[in-house]
């Protein structure tokens, strides 16, 4: 399953992606699905099994995540 993190700014989205990748977590910047909303319109997709580690990294790097979501194939 995939998870999605949303952010208020593009810079936070890019910092999240870079931090995940530097720590061996697959992450990809994607547009926010229509069913969700975010201030900057970008989100970052990552594997849900890395959720605990992602939250630890965000806390350690002061990355301000608006929300986390589990997403399925029907999210567009």
Image (cartoon, grey):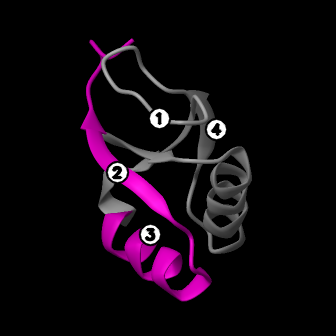
Task: Say which quarter of the image contains residue 69.
Answer: top left
Indicate left or right for 43 with 23 as reference.
left
When the figure is inspected, residue 34 is found, relative to residue 28, above or below; the finding is above
Alpha carbon distance from label 2 to label 1: 9 Å
* Proximity of marks 3 and 1: CB atoms separated by less than 8 Å: no
Q: Residue sitting at 32 percent across and 53 percent down? A: 48
State which tag comes first along the sequence, 4 or 3: 4
Q: Residue sitting at 64 percent across and 38 percent down? A: 29
Q: Which dot marks residue 29?
A: 4
Q: Which dot marks residue 54?
A: 3
Magenta segment, which residues?
A: 51-76
* Proximity of marks 2 and 3: CB atoms separated by less than 8 Å: no
When the figure is inspected, residue 8 is found, relative to residue 34, above or below; the finding is below
Horizontal and vertical percent position of residue 16: 62, 60
Alpha carbon distance from label 4 to label 2: 15 Å
Q: Locate the C terminus and report the quarter of the image it occupies.
A: top left
Q: Residue sitting at 51 percent across and 65 percent down? A: 64
Circle 1 residue: 38
Circle 2 residue: 67
């Amino acid at each position: 399953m995939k998870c999605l993190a949303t952010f208020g700014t593009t810079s936070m989205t890019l910092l999240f992606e870079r931090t995940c990748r530097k720590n061996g977590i697959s992450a990809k910047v994607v547009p926010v699905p229509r069913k969700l909303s975010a201030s900057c319109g970008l989100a970052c997709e990552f594997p849900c099994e890395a959720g605990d580690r992602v939250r630890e990294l965000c806390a350690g790097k002061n990355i301000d995540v608006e929300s986390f979501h589990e997403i399925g194939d029907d999210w567009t």
